[in-house]
Image (cartoon, rainbow, N blue to C red):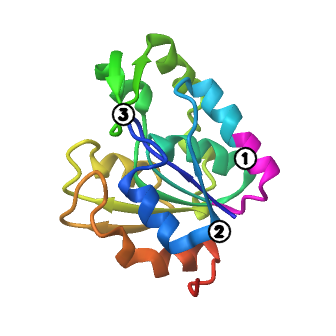
């Protein structure tokens, strides 16, 4: 089974989630994790332990969570425009926020500290487990930061695109190849 972990201010009903569900069908679990990072990790770990998860696909903040989980459980992981240091980049969102589908939540300063505790030092990363899909035109997160952090992993870097990673479906074969999933669904 594959676990998909969505990004910040989005949900398991995002565009990327729907695209992945359409392709992987019953082989993927779309996680709707809690807002509080320490609760999110507990929730995601429970899925990994109980649903026979063999790989992770994650985007943005989900990529940060996936890095922690991939390292802990030794899972092949696809990171789509991942957040490398969300304990810094989500500071601007302190206070009230709304997800893409209208759910309101409050992002608190203590969550930044919880995120920082989940950070895996670069020297401890199991680089062979990571395949990054990056688009240079991402205006939310600088692709160069992820490129540097996961420098020994595998990469697909495109010149154009966006934070959402435009045309993700063009890369399903390479995703399947990396995680060892049959491309015939």
Tag 3–tag 2 contact (CB < 8 Å): no
* Dot label at residue 113: none
Disc number at residue 99? Answer: 3
In the image, 92 versus 71, the foreground residue is 92
Q: Closest to the observer: 146 or 138? A: 138
Using the rendered view, name the quadrant where residue 86 is placed: top left
Q: Residue drawn 48% across and 70% down?
A: 22
Q: What's the distance in space between the residues labelled 2 and 1, CA to CA?
A: 14 Å
Q: Is residue 128 magenta?
A: no
Magenta stretch in the rendered image: 45-55
Name the secondary structure under disc 1.
helix
Q: Is residue 54 magenta?
A: yes
Give residue 140's position: percent from left, percent from top.
25, 42
Q: Is residue 86 visible?
A: yes
Residue beneath the point at 74% across and 50% down? 48
Q: Secondary structure at mark 2?
A: helix
- Label 1, on which residue? 47
Residue, x 49% and y 47% (percent of image)?
12
- Does the rendering let one see residue 94? no
Q: Quadrant of residue 25?
A: bottom right
Left or right of 55? Residue 115 is left
Q: Is residue 183 left or right of residue 82?
A: right
- Which residue is at a point 34% across and 32% down the rendered structure image? 102
């Amino acid at each position: 089974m594959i676990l998909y972990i969505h990004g910040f201010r989005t949900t398991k009903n995002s565009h990327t989630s729907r695209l992945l569900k359409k392709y992987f069908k019953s082989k993927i679990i779309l996680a709707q994790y809690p807002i509080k990072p320490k609760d999110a990790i507990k929730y995601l770990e429970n899925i990994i332990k109980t649903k026979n998860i063999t790989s992770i696909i994650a985007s943005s903040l989900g990529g940060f969570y996936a890095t922690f989980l991939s390292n802990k459980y030794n899972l092949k992981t696809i990171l789509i425009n991942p957040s490398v240091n969300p304990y810094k980049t989500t500071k601007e969102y302190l206070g009230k926020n709304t997800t893409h589908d209208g759910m309101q939540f409050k992002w608190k300063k203590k969550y930044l500290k919880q995120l920082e505790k989940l950070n895996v030092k670069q020297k401890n990363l199991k680089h062979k487990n990571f395949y990054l899909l990056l688009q240079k035109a991402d205006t939310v997160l600088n692709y160069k930061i992820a490129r540097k952090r996961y420098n020994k992993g595998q990469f697909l870097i495109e010149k154009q695109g966006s934070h959402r990673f435009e045309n993700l479906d063009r890369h399903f074969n390479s995703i399947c190849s990396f995680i060892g999933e049959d491309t015939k669904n």
